[in-house]
Image (cartoon, grey):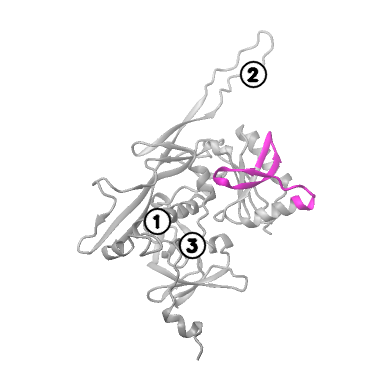
C-alpha cells in the first residue's frame, strides 16, 4: 500500500501558528469617542452648576416710561453620582506554567486573560452607553417549564445581536427587578432562517417566564435607585424625565429635541436629519457633531443619497471610524452606525457636551501591591479590573433624537 496522508498522519507534525485569530466582534465605536472627553471626579459625586434661565427684566419703553422690573439669571445644580463596572479573571497555577512561553501556547495565560477581560468589559460598557440603566438586554416571551426560552415578539435585531453564548444572566421582572432565574449561562442560541436569534438555551433547571420578563447580566438588573449600569443615551437624549437631579418640568431647557412620527416609520432623509440639527441649534444654541444610528437606519440613509445621485462623502472620526456626510448647519455632520444603537433611531450628539466623569481609568485592583492575588485554598490566582465612571451631559438640549426611522 502506498504511503498517503491518511496513514502517515501519526508521523506528521502539526504546525501551530503563533497568533490567535480573533473571532469576536469587539467594535466599540461610541465608547472610543466618549473616552476622549473625560473629567476627573473626587468624592461621592460631581456637582455641576447649570445656567437655566435668562434675566427677563428687559424690554423696550416709551420716553419716560417705567423701567422693566429687575429680574435675575437662574442657576441649578446637576448632581452626578458614579457607576461601577468590574471584570474578574482566575487562572490556575499549572495553566500559568504551561502557557508561560509562545512555544507552549498560542497566547500566554496572564496576558491573554487580562487583555481579554479588558476588551470584554469595554465592549459591555459600549452597550450600556445606549441603555436606560436598568440592565435590560432583551425581553423573553411566555415560556412554560423549559430551558429553551423564546424571545419576545417585539425584541429588536440590536437586542438579539447582543446575546452571546457563555453570558451569565438573570431573568425576571424589570421594575422592580425580581428574579425568576439567577446566574444561568446561555449555552446555545437558536437562529431563524434569516440568521437572527429567536430563542436561547440556558443552563440549570427548567424555568417559567411571563411575556415581557427581562434578561440582564447577572447582578446588573435594577430600577430607580437600585440601577447600577451607566446612564445611557436613551435616558440622556430625551425630552422627558429627571436627569441627574434636574427636572425638565421645572426647568424646560433641560430636555433634548425629539422628532417622532407617532410610531409610523419614515425614511431617514437628509432633510429630516437636517431639520433635527436646526431645531436642536435653535433650542440649545449649538450644533451636533454626528448622528449615531443602527446599521439598518444607516443603510436607509445611504440609500436616500443614492436615490438623489449624491456622492457618499465620508468624515473621519476618532478611532479610524468613517461616517457618511450630512449637509446641515454651519458644517458637515456625520452619520455613523453602532452595533448597540437601538433600532429605528438616530441620536444626534454634541461631543463637547457629552462627558465621561470618572474616578478611575481602566485599572486593576492592586492596593495590596499586587494585581494577581492568591485564591485561598486553591492553586490559582485572581485579578479584578474596575472602572468608576458615569456618562453625563452638561447641556441636555445640545443633543437631538430622531425616532421612527425605517431600516434597510
Which is in the foreground here, disc 2 or disc 3? Answer: 3
Which residue was labeled with disc 3?
21
Which residue was labeled with disc 1?
117
The residue located at (61%, 33%) in the rendering is 286
In magenta stretch: residue 331: yes
Which residue was labeled with disc 2?
59
Furthest toward the front, the residue is 2
N-term-proximal mark, 1 vs 2: 2
The residue located at (53%, 43%) in the rendering is 33
- Disc 1 and disc 3: Cα gap in Å? 16 Å
Q: Secondary structure at mark 1?
A: helix
Question: For this view, does 363 lie left or right of residue 350?
Answer: left
The residue located at (54%, 20%) in the rendering is 71
Q: Secondary structure at mark 3?
A: loop
Q: Position of residue 324 (x, y in %)?
A: 67, 47
Which is in the foreground here, disc 1 or disc 2? Answer: 1
Q: Nearer the viewer, residue 192 or 206?
A: 192
The residue range painted magenta reads 305-333
The residue located at (54%, 49%) in the rendering is 29
Furthest toward the left, the residue is 377
N-term-proximal mark, 2 vs 3: 3
Q: Position of residue 355 (x, y in %)?
A: 48, 39
In magenta stretch: residue 372: no
- The crowd level at tag 3 (other Cα within 10 Å; few <14, some 14-19, many 20+) is few
Amino acid at each position: 500500500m502506498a504511503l498517503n496522508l491518511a496513514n502517515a498522519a501519526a508521523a506528521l507534525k502539526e504546525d501551530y501558528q503563533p497568533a490567535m485569530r480573533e473571532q469576536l466582534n469587539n467594535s466599540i465605536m461610541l465608547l472610543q469617542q466618549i473616552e476622549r472627553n473625560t473629567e476627573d471626579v473626587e468624592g461621592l459625586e460631581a456637582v455641576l452648576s447649570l445656567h437655566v434661565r435668562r434675566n427677563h427684566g428687559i424690554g423696550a419703553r416709551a420716553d419716560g416710561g417705567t423701567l422693566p422690573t429687575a429680574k435675575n439669571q437662574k442657576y441649578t445644580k446637576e448632581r452626578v453620582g458614579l457607576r461601577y463596572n468590574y471584570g474578574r479573571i482566575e487562572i490556575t497555577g499549572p495553566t500559568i506554567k504551561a502557557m508561560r512561553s509562545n512555544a507552549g501556547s498560542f497566547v500566554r495565560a496572564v496576558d491573554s486573560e487580562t487583555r481579554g477581560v479588558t476588551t470584554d468589559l469595554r465592549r459591555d460598557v459600549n452597550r450600556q452607553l445606549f441603555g436606560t440603566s436598568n440592565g435590560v438586554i432583551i425581553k423573553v416571551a411566555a415560556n412554560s417549564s423549559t430551558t429553551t426560552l423564546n424571545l419576545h415578539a417585539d425584541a429588536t435585531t440590536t437586542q438579539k445581536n447582543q446575546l452571546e453564548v457563555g453570558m451569565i444572566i438573570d431573568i425576571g421582572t424589570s421594575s422592580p427587578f425580581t428574579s425568576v432565574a439567577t446566574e444561568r449561562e446561555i449555552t446555545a442560541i437558536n437562529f431563524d432562517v434569516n440568521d437572527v436569534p429567536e430563542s436561547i438555551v440556558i443552563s440549570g433547571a427548567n424555568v417559567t417566564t411571563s411575556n415581557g420578563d427581562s434578561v440582564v447580566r447577572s447582578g446588573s438588573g435594577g430600577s430607580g435607585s437600585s440601577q447600577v449600569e451607566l446612564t445611557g443615551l436613551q435616558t440622556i437624549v430625551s425630552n422627558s424625565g429627571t436627569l441627574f437631579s434636574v427636572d425638565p418640568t421645572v426647568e424646560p431647557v433641560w430636555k433634548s429635541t425629539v422628532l417622532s412620527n407617532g410610531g409610523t416609520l419614515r425614511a431617514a432623509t437628509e432633510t429630516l436629519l437636517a431639520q433635527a440639527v436646526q431645531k436642536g441649534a435653535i433650542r440649545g444654541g449649538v450644533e451636533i457633531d454626528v448622528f449615531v444610528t443602527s446599521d439598518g437606519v444607516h443603510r436607509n440613509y445611504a440609500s436616500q443619497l443614492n436615490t438623489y445621485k449624491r456622492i457618499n462623502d465620508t468624515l473621519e472620526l476618532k478611532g479610524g471610524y468613517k461616517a457618511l456626510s450630512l449637509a446641515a448647519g454651519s458644517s458637515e455632520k456625520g452619520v455613523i452606525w453602532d452595533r448597540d444603537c437601538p433600532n429605528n433611531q438616530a441620536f444626534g450628539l454634541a461631543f463637547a457636551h457629552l462627558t465621561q466623569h470618572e474616578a478611575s481609568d481602566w485599572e486593576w485592583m492592586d492596593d495590596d501591591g499586587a494585581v494577581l492575588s492568591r485564591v485561598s485554598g486553591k492553586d490559582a490566582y485572581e485579578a479584578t479590573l474596575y472602572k468608576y465612571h458615569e456618562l453625563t451631559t452638561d447641556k441636555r438640549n445640545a443633543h437631538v433624537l430622531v425616532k421612527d426611522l425605517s431600516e434597510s
